[in-house]
Amino acid sequence: MAETATDPVCGMTVEDSPTTPRITYQGRTYLFCSTACKDRFTADPDQYTEEER
């Protein structure tokens, strides 16, 4: 069974696969449902990670 994560931009559950868009920010890897969500996160990552601090 594949690992899953929650897309920090849209909240969708994402399955981890070699083609899943991802980025590592401040030592943590985030997975995304699409490159559009990845691009939104990249433009302003603090907007999507602020709650975790």
Image (cartoon, rainbow, N blue to C red):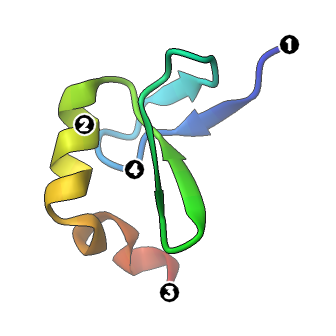
> Going 23% across and 70% down the picture, which residue do you hit?
47
Residue 1 placement (x, y as % from top left):
85, 13
Element under label 3? loop
Earlier residue among tags 2 and 3: 2
Residue ID for mark 4: 8
> Going 39% across and 70% down the picture, which residue do you hit?
49
Residue ID for mark 1: 1
Element under label 2? helix
Earlier residue among tags 2 and 1: 1
Q: Residue furthest right?
A: 1
Q: Mark 2 to mark 3: distance in Å?
A: 21 Å
Q: Residue furthest bottom?
A: 53
Going by the numbered disc 4, the residue's amino acid type is: Pro
Q: Are marks 2 and 3 in contact (CB under 8 Å)?
A: no
Q: Are marks 2 and 4 in contact (CB under 8 Å)?
A: no
Residue 35 placement (x, y as % from top left):
26, 27
Going by the numbered disc 2, the residue's amino acid type is: Cys
Residue 28 placement (x, y as % from top left):
59, 63
Residue ID for mark 3: 53
> Going 42% across and 29% down the picture, which residue do you hit?
21
Q: Nearer the viewer, mark 2 or mark 3?
A: 2
Residue ID for mark 2: 37
